[in-house]
Image (cartoon, grey):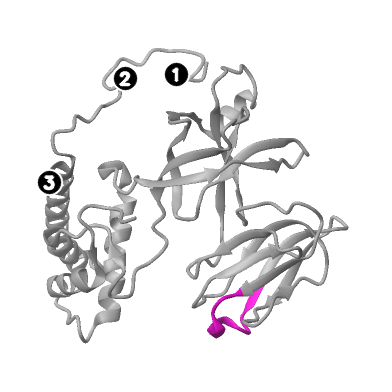
Amino acid sequence: MPTGLNPCTVAEAGPIMARSMGFSWEQDRTEVVEYVNKFRTLLYTEYEKFKLFDDSFHCICVQNFVEETGNPYQGFTLPNSVLGPVAVFAYGLPLRLRSRWREAHNGIGVESSGRVEAFLMAEQFATERDIKAITKIKLYTEHEKDAGKKVHVEVIDASNRQRRIEFTLMHDGWAVSPVKIRKILSVSLPVRSGSVLLAQQDGYELSLYDPWETAPSYRRMKLRDQCPKGTVIVQGTKNPRQKVYFDHDIVEVGNDLVIEEAGKFFKYGESTTDQKEIQTAEYHKTKMDGYLHGEIARQRGGAIQDGSKFKGGRITACKDLPGYT
């Protein structure tokens, strides 16, 4: 689904960006698209200021995983389109989210409250699913242009030795590992035109990597108690790594004034130490922020934005952080 504030296409945003920077959309398209992506990155980076792009929703099946120590647990992997969780719901009710600090200092499962809680794990994982048994793994590429490219996978093999395996992608078949694998540590993919599927030898899929993924790294959440329903709804912040290029690709903010001021900010603020140019760039950045705040207010309409009840309150000395007792 579209994400953002009145989003537009690259075909619409490109000419606006080009005019504001003194480029020609027809002649300098590649360079202009780079600045369109810079504009998107700028908006994503200023999440704390604008709280944009936190409306990515996914229904995810809860899975069984195993820790390094062998302890089983229930949890789920965040999709690659989600950078971080904003909320998790089960049976329509929000779960209490905990940071990895809580687990590190208090331990998971301590002081069970009778309410399912979700912990963002400290580790990151190269696959969406774990290997279910010691097995060979295989790779398949969907695009014929990617045939012959190399993929490197760091693994723990059946003999508990760490090793790197090189795969040569095949368009008309699977590239299979020469040895059985106990665990996948990391995956390094080349720049590609299509997606790559990683699976066990029996066909059990471990990950489907998008064309823009070269060093896949997935975040996982652990549930302290059993989730009876088996599925959760995750609301998260959108991952900005996927770039736009084609005319039909979506640019999340389509306000022409915001795009125009962003272009002038880049034009005067990049690669300069001249104070007048820096001040001019800051002026256009301030105007961009003002237009963006106006667009956000227009979208929210009359909705009252609830703030923290602790905002402005006096900080008192205590042994434990609020919410962690």
Q: Residue furthest right?
A: 159
Q: Is tag 1's residue or tag 3's residue first in the polypeptide sequence?
A: 3
Asked whether 319 falls inside the magenta stretch, the response is: no
What is the distance, in whole Å, between disc 1 and disc 2 at their CAs?
10 Å
Amino acid found under the numbered disc labelled 3: Gly
Amino acid found under the numbered disc labelled 2: Phe
Q: Quadrant of residue 275?
A: bottom left
Q: Is tag 3's residue or tag 2's residue first in the polypeptide sequence?
A: 3
Circles 1, 2 touching at the beta carbon (< 8 Å) = yes
Q: Which residue is mark 1?
A: 322
Q: Which residue is mark 3?
A: 294
Question: Residue 263: where, in percent of width, then height?
Answer: 18, 66
Q: Is tag 1's residue or tag 2's residue first in the polypeptide sequence?
A: 2
Of residue 60 and residue 288, the one placed in the foreground of this image is 60
Question: Residue 185: where, in percent of width, then height?
Answer: 69, 57
Question: Residue 2: where, in percent of width, then height?
Answer: 30, 56
Establish if 94 lies above or below 130.
above
Q: Which residue is mark 2?
A: 310
Q: Quadrant of the N terminus?
A: bottom left
Looking at the rendering, the stretch of residues picked out in magenta corresponds to 141-151
